[in-house]
Amino acid sequence: MTDLAEAQDLLRRNIALNGLEGRCFAAELPFGTNVDAALQKIFPSKDLEGLNIGKGRRIDVVIASDCTYSYMAKFTWEPLAHTILSAASCGSSSEKLHSVETAGEERRQSCMPTTELWLAHQERYGANDKAVRPFFDFLAQASEIKSKLDSSCGIPTSSSFVEIKHPQIGEDSQFYSEEYPLRIFHALLPGKSAVS
Amino acid sequence: MSLLIEEKGDDPACLGSLFEISDSDSENEAPTNYTSIIPTVAMQPSKEMLEDSVSLKVKGDCGSSSTNSTAISHFVTLSGHDTSIDLVQFNDGVEDRLEGTGGVCWGCAPALCSVLATSNAEANSVSFQGTDFSGKLVLELGAGTGAVGLWIAAHWPSAKVRVTTLRCYCFLIVVKLQVLIILSYLLTNTIGYID
């Protein structure tokens, strides 16, 4: 059992172990946090130099691996979903839309760049298909909105759920079984306008 | 369709804030099977992908950390697609124990790294295309050991990666303290009753 300081220590130790201090940073971000509101905490100003975060640069990719499991026999997915969608809507709309200059307002709203989402899930601690279904349903619906909105812009959007059945992915076969297949969820999520 | 996210206040278990998310337009009930919404594809990896899949190997013991945790005890290596990173993790990750859950590199990490590193040509057999994180800003949630985020940073040197942790460990400590308090209360009352 560990506390937050130890969790941070573990992350920083692994970053240093691989010599990735300049490109990979550790921060605290509890599920349920609004990423836009916590941006300065997650990305301190000195780290933002050159990244243009907060001036319209969006978070391009959100990843989460093995985050869909239960505490106290319940998978509470709303906080995680909120953080994912808030990360997708990060950044100012004006900058996001600068590349779509000729279209009308409605069209421009619909053409905001997307955030790519990758989730890896395997049943653990009771987070079975039934328990995680509302979570993935919700994310699929969120990505479907973008898919509909972007149909006139030619921006490719999709959501897919890939079940990896082959046990040879990774040599450590202890994690792979027919009973608990690995699943990779991939979606392109909408920006702020589609989530009110 | 309009998705509503309503903040309900702070979560006493320090997991963050409480939210209620609803679809304000749809009156239909959620489908009984999520595959009805999300296209599900059983992935059959190509030969090339299998030969260079990202694997997870235990490298050896590394003793306890400089912190007061005695659980940090193992080095593991995540390698494949010309990329290799070393990780320190809590416990050995073999037993599916709740203790140190967030500090273990589980099986999803190498699988996700394998899929991310799959080229477009390889990925054409499934429903998504391969990805390139060069120059992109990547946020990993609930990173634990940071396995996937670190692997991405190593594989795409121009990517900027932020690995983040949550407070679930605090949550577990709160639960443990509550159990101790209850046990202490029961023990005290029992002794008082006997007296």
Image (cartoon, coloured by chain):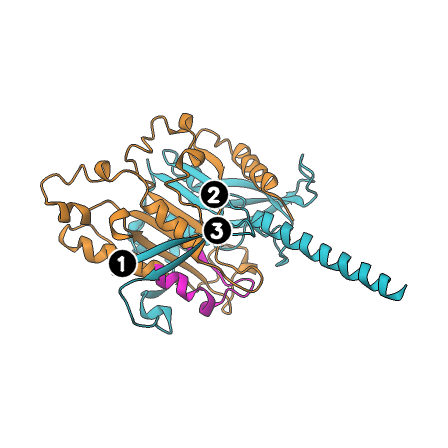
Chain colours: A orange, B cyan
Q: Earlier in the sequence, mark 3 or mark 1?
A: 1
Vertical position of residue A132 compared to residue B151: above or below: below
- In which quarter of the view is residue B187 placed? bottom right
Q: Which class describes the residues within 10 Å of circle 2: few (<14), some (14-19), or many (20+)? A: many
Output the chain of dot 1.
Answer: B
Chain letter of the residue carrying label 2: A
Question: Which amino acid, mark 2?
Answer: Leu
The residue positioned 59% from the left and 48% from the top of the image is: B169
Determine the residue located farthest toward the bottom in the rendered image: B32
Instruction: Give the image location of residue A135, x and y in percent.
Output: 40, 61
> Which chain does tag 3 point to?
B
Q: Can you say which quadrant of the picture contains the C terminus of chain B? A: bottom right
- A132 falls in the magenta region: yes
Q: Say which element carries label 2.
A: loop
The reply to whether callout 3 and callout 1 are in contact (CB within 8 Å) is no
Give the CA distance from mark 3 to mark 2.
Answer: 19 Å
What count of labels does the image hold? 3
* CA distance separating discs 1 and 2: 26 Å
- Position of residue A83 in the picture relative to residue A145 (left or right): right
Location of residue A39 in the rendering, given as x and y in whole percent from the top left corner:
39, 37
Task: Describe the element under mark 3 as helix, strand or loop.
Answer: helix
In the rendered structure, the answer to whether residue A90 lies left or right of residue B84 reads left
Q: Depth-wise, is mark 3 or mark 1 nearer the camera?
A: 1
Q: Amino acid at mark 1?
A: Ser
Q: Report which residue position mark 1 lands on.
A: B2
**Residue at the disc numbered 3:** B109
Q: Amino acid at mark 3?
A: Ala
Q: Position of residue A122 (x, y in %)?
A: 48, 61
The residue to which callout 2 is attached is A29
Front in this rendered view, residue B87 or A80: A80
Give yes or no for residue B38 being in the magenta stretch.
no
